[in-house]
Amino acid sequence: MKVKVIVSILVFLFFGFTLAGCSTVGKVREEKLQIRIAEQYGLAYAPVQIMKEKKLIEKYLPEIEITWRQLGNTAAIREAMLAGELDVGFMAIPPFLIGWDKGMEWKIACGLSSSPVGLVVNKDNIKSIQDFTPEDRIALPQPGSVQHILLSLASEKLWGDPSRLDNLLVTLGHPDGMNALLAQREVSAHFTTPPYLFKELENPGMHQILDGREAMGEEFTFIVGVTTAELYQDQPKVYDAFLRALEEAVNFMDKNPVETVDILAEAYQIEQEELLKYLEHPDMAYSLEVKGVMKFADFMQKNDYIKREPANLEEVLWDRNDK
Amino acid sequence: MTNKDSSRNKIKTRLFWITIILITWEIMAKSGAFPEAIFPSLLDIARALGDSVVSGEILLQTGFSLVLILEGFLISLLAAILMSSLAVSNKVFNGLVDTLTAIAHPLPGIALLPLIIIWFGTGTLSIIVIIVHSVIWPMILNIMTGFRAISPVYKEAGLNFGLNHFRIIKDIMIPASLPYVLSGMRIGWARAWRALISAEMIFGAVGLKGGLGWYIFKQRVFMDTPGMFAGLFVIVLIGIIVEDYVFAAFEERTVKKWGMI
């Protein structure tokens, strides 16, 4: 019994020290200029790709060390930022607000893009969300995603009940969602973004019954850039360089469409003509301006997706001018 | 008597270590070294578990998962016994089963997921297909090994009694290879759980029902870390109950009673 007690104390201490060791890692990196960014594929993230390929952050801070990390989805990016492994992530407003609500120390640094978001159906008799039957299934990326919140907004507007269609939801990533929609089995609708949205609509029998702006009732930023408090407060030079670089990337895309298409076609492995068509879509726009945060926050708080609501935009948006 | 003592001892040791782990956990959580969203305290986890039991959600999802896994498990068990029986009775079929097992056994169910979505859609059928795939091959391997380990004397004795092929399999080969079948079932069960939870996490729910994997995934997207641990707790609990009580009791009543192990 004595041996047992001693062994357990040792194990206990071992666990304790191992875990305590994890939290000291963060302190070492303060002296070095570095930024760790989550890289994502998709047209909505195009300026990030340009910023990377044209080495724009390095232009403002030549000595900086940049780490680009690829992560599967928004939840993974959020978890990596929570664990202190990432400084910057790009995501839609609702997942950001969920993290903010749970006490994550992060705020929106900038907008990135607005994009078409559409609900595509594969049945001719479905003309609006009113026509869904209990047998229909709607695929979207995950609960709490911008697509889910937009669908809830549309349901609330129509029936006063945001969760009316929740029983029909199937959670599928964009590529699987597209396959399921085109297979015409139980999935009859898919709420998605380009290029999947455009590809689906090219198929016969597919049509769109709802778009993001219609559901939201106003324009909104689809993807925002989010940074941790650590980056904003402890590394103001890096934070500033990042924002300038992103701004330059957006301007670059505007002024050099040919080179932009070259870079993006290569990075995303899409045909140039196809890409050009996507980029010229009237709803596809890039800007650092942030729109729609308060409307999302208000709706999500009223319907229990989040528990608290920011009193004003400053609570969730880093102020650029107090530097 | 000794049996009971050893099982009581086992429970004691487990309780002892669980207490140690829980105390360490609580101290770490309370020390504030990590944000609450990473390392929630036991009280938060207990509260999350309590809430979802009261609202009925975790029970509903657990029930859904258990029904699926039992369905998939029974289908696999019957199919594995059928295929193994055919394989021992027929040389051509033996080659086929052997080849199929060699091809399919190393394939993780999750690797087949994209294909399964295209072929079977995203409903419960697909999850059953993944469970059956995870269970059936190790089960066949174990049953076949069991069949081969039977001394030919038993079979010949059966033939002398004038038993037909079906009865030789049912009354001699299956009982005689039961220890192997049982270990096949244990491996199968563990693999089925993994396959089920992973598939549920990737598929997402059809409607409200998506099983325990879906429950955990939903807590993840809404950043409810205590809720995630509540889901994990239920998975562990079911695992322990099935292993220590269901399989152990089955073993007690069959192979141990017959003096096979």
Image: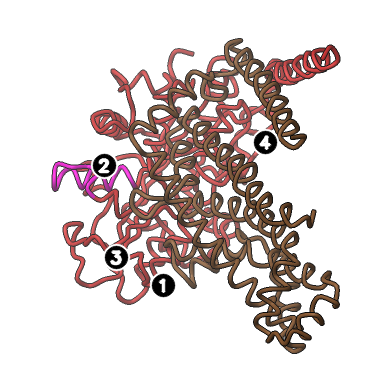
Q: Residue A81: tell me if it is visible.
A: yes
Decide which of tag 2 and tag 4 comes sooner along the chain: 4
Tell which subunit mark 4 falls on.
A
Q: Residue A31: tell me if it is visible.
A: no
Residue on which disc 1 sits:
A183
Could you tell me the amino acid type at mark 2?
A: Glu
**Residues at discs 3 and 2 both on one chain:** yes
Q: What's the CA distance linking mark 1 and mark 3? A: 12 Å
Q: How many marks?
A: 4
Chain B's colour is brown
Relative to B180, say whether A5 is above or below. Answer: above
Quadrant holding the N terminus of chain A: top right
On whether residue A108 falls in the magenta region, the answer is: no
Camera-side mark, 1 or 4: 1
The answer to whether residue B187 is left or right of residue B156 is left
Could you tell me the amino acid type at mark 1?
A: Ala
Q: Are marks 1 and 4 in contact (CB under 8 Å)?
A: no
Tell which subunit mark 2 falls on.
A
In this view of the protein, which residue sits in the foreground, B126 or A262?
Answer: B126
For label 2, count other residues whose C-alpha is less than 10 Å away and answer few (under 14), some (14-19) or many (20+). Answer: few
